[in-house]
Image (cartoon, helix red, strand yellow):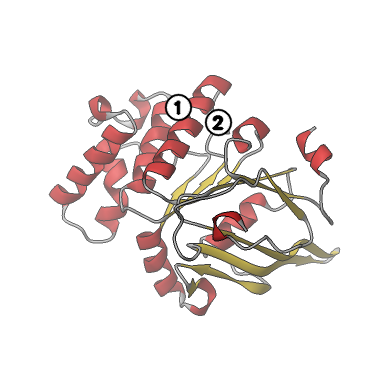
Amino acid sequence: MAGGRAAARPHQGAIVWNDTPMTMLSAGPLLEVTDLTKRYRSGAGTLTVFDGLSFAVEAGESVAITGESGSGKSTLLHLLSGLDDPDAGTVLCEGRNLFSMTEAERAVFRGRTMGYVWQQYALLPEFTAEENAAMPLLAAGRGRRESLAEARVKLDEVGLAGRASHRPGELSGGEQQRVALARALVARPRILLADEPTGNLDQSTGEAIISLLLRLQEAHRLACVVVTHNLEFAARCRRVIKLGKGGAVSLAAALA
């Protein structure tokens, strides 16, 4: 297989396409999903979101997750980050099984290993862009001076060096999402997860954000998983996984 990556295993509810040859990847995947199953039970019965889902993401590789509303895109990200538990299957991050850890161990591991970008920017309005970007380091017990210095470096990377002292209310939506991206990267994670990062932005601003996210992802050789409903943005990732309700979605339907 080109680039040394094993072929994705067949599974219910998803199809992979846009698979291009990879070079200069790490010896093993940073993120490895095996036979992942998630169900929701209610008085009306059991809803299987996905069953036996398997894929892997290498360092420097970007994967887009698409699908209709309710197909399990955000649920999958919650499982990948250990914010939710599966009914079956494993998620290995840097070779460690998230679900063999305690909640406390998982939180520490997540803070060290993963960066997360939400659709809602989730910035604290009373703090500056610099302080918001530094929050993961401050929460981990790093010194304020050191944390703010790291935050300034990341704000410069996302093009906001001149806006570091501004509060969220003084920033545009695109600028706020740049701060959120700086915050996701400030702890130097190896895995980047993004849940509809352009969902609250217009097309032009969204294009700028997705370009920046993918450029930084490649520059830092992160394993990146992006949930998006925008197929144009998804096509810019190296691979696309489309989740479907109750079975695989054909390529033609996915691109329609």
Q: As drawn, is 128 to the left or to the right of 19?
A: left
Q: Position of residue 199 (x, y in %)?
A: 58, 33
Query: Residue at horizontal 69%, vertical 53%?
Result: 72
Q: Is residue 132 above or below residue 3?
A: above
Q: Residue at x 22, y 38 (%)?
A: 152
Please tell me the numbered disc located at residue 173: 1
The tag on residue 47 is none
What's the residue type where badge 1 is placed? Answer: Gly
Give the residue number, with chain letter if any, for mark 2.
Answer: 200
Which residue lies most toward the front here?
2
Left or right side of 89 for 193:
left
Q: Position of residue 29 (x, y in %)?
A: 51, 63
Assess disc 2: are there few (<14), some (14-19) or many (≥20) residues with their C-alpha within 10 Å of its C-alpha.
some
From this viewpoint, which residue is outermost toward the top? 204
Q: Nearest the camera: 233 or 197?
A: 233
The C terminus sits in image quarter: top right
**What is the CA distance from the residue labelled 1 to the residue labelled 2?**
8 Å
Q: Amino acid at mark 2?
A: Asn
In the figure, residue 94 lies in which quadrant?
A: bottom left
Residue 170, horizontal then vertical, whole percent? 34, 24
Please, what secondary structure does the residue beneath circle 2 have? loop
Residue 123 visible in the shown view: no
Q: Is residue 163 above or below residue 124?
A: above
- Disc 1, SS: helix
Q: Counting residues from the N terminus, which is met first, the one under dot 1 or under dot 2? A: 1
Is mark 1 in CB contact (under 8 Å) with mark 2? Answer: yes
Q: Nearer the viewer, residue 97 or 107?
A: 97
Residue at image x 76%, y 35%? 255
Q: Is residue 37 visible?
A: yes
Residue 15 as seen in the image, left or right of residue 20: right
Front position in the image: 178 or 97: 97
